Image (cartoon, rainbow, N blue to C red):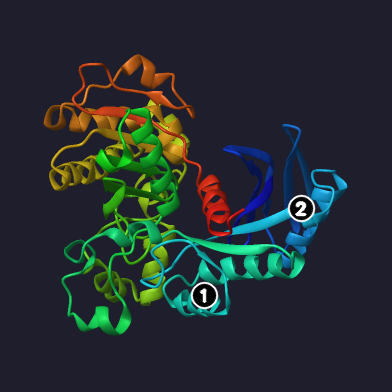
Amino acid sequence: MSKIISVNAGSSSLKFQLYEMSNGSEDVVTSGVVERIGLSDAIFTIKVNGEKQTEVLPILDHAVAVKMLLDKLVTLQIVASLDEIDGVGHRVVHGGEYFNASVIVDADVEEKVVELSDLAPLHNPANLVGYRAFKEALSKAKHVFVFDTAFHQTMSEDVYMYPIPYSYYTDLKIRRYGFHGTSHDYVSKRTAELIGKDVKEANTIICHLGNGASISAIQGGKSVNTSMGFTPLAGVMMGTRSGDVDPSIMPFIMEKEGLSSQEVLDILNKKSGMLGISDISNDARDIENACKEGNPRAILTSEIYANRIAATIGSYFIQLGHVDAIAFTAGIGENDTGVREAVCTKIAEAMGVVLNQEINRKSRGVETLLSTSDSKIQVWLVPTNEELVIARDTKKLLSL
């Protein structure tokens, strides 16, 4: 019986999930999140016996958050001793070209993740802070890094290269990397199981739609294309991110508005997407409600969002040659029935997709076949589980 904790450390947050794994069982012992780290009104939430306990208190840094979490595990009698925790799996956003799979952490791995912080300045340093805090607190446990980018390292050179001077790739490592890899990995494998195919024989398109969104083409269990690129800004429209736009827009805005390149990037990352078009919210639920009220900007936002997703699905359909299933996952994909309907309507004629409207409209957050029996491609709702992927990789690598 092994206890493994999956950790996702953000710049001001810490998500965790403790698993007990043995003989095929993968039981969640507890889970929770620490939010607003660094502030006097930080929020600590932990689930105990199926019920959430929440505290608001000062948590000044990640080390304090980790200590509080581990203390809670003992005081709430979730574990008798911290020595019961055998492994810690850490989400790391960027693995560059160094890592095409999860790895046991050593000094060389840590050094490479530090180096890659140039490619993910908001994420990798935070991931490292979380790792170091857990390493100090759990000296007997072993640690594993699970990379967002690793799953997409199977893309071919003609897919991941940008048509810019080749020296920018060799010297600066500019290329398509892709993100949300643990989610695409889990959902593509689970979708293959649901349609009754060996993952090595299945072609799927995975739509990870949350505040951040990415779509991937999966062939035989391997990523052959994905919508995010050098950074998570690329691809389809998102909550506050623009997705793909004409790059000439940046210098045009800089000249007309007197802004720096960083200021324009902030606009594309934080003030665009659903928020920018609607001027209402970056939350798809707010957009959906405004659409029902007939708000024209909300309706336009929904149309652009569905168009971008449908166009990406269509291009991947051509690349794959045939598609066995399309899966919707993450916050919007699992819960926004209108988005799923709009996307499937746009690809219906070209791809032979027939959505069961009644089932779709009542399906949220639970594995569900959304298409009819005469649909040429099955459409599924498949909740993602990135924490489980992290725990599984940690168990496998540490031979627990």
Residue 397 position in % (x across, y down): 53, 59
Earlier in the chain: of badge 1 and badge 2, it is: 2
Q: Residue at x 41, y 68 (%)?
A: 99
Q: Secondary structure at mark 1?
A: helix
Q: Is residue 269 left or right of residue 142?
A: left
Cα separation between marks 1 and 2? 25 Å
Residue 311 visible here: yes
Q: Is residue 20 left or right of residue 236?
A: right
Q: Residue at x 42, y 33 (%)?
A: 382
Residue 59 visible here: no
Residue at numbered disc 1: 109
Query: Is residue 118 placed above or below 348 in the rendered structure?
Result: below
- Classify mark 2: residues with Cα within 10 Å, few (<14), some (14-19) or many (20+): some
Residue 235 position in % (x across, y down): 29, 54
Count of number-bearing discs: 2
Towards the viewer: 26 or 129: 26
Disc 2 marks a residue whose amino acid type is Glu
Q: Write down the quadrant of residue 126 in the picture.
A: bottom right
Residue at numbered disc 2: 84
Residue 250 position in % (x across, y down): 28, 70
- Classify mark 1: residues with Cα within 10 Å, few (<14), some (14-19) or many (20+): some
Asked if labels 2 and 1 touch by Cβ distance under 8 angstroms, the answer is: no
Q: Write down the quadrant of residue 149 in the picture.
A: bottom left
Q: Secondary structure at mark 2?
A: helix
Q: Is residue 44 left or right of residue 209?
A: right
Residue found at the far right of this picture: 75
Q: Residue at x 44, y 33 (%)?
A: 334
Towards the viewer: 67 or 288: 67
Disc 1 marks a residue whose amino acid type is Val
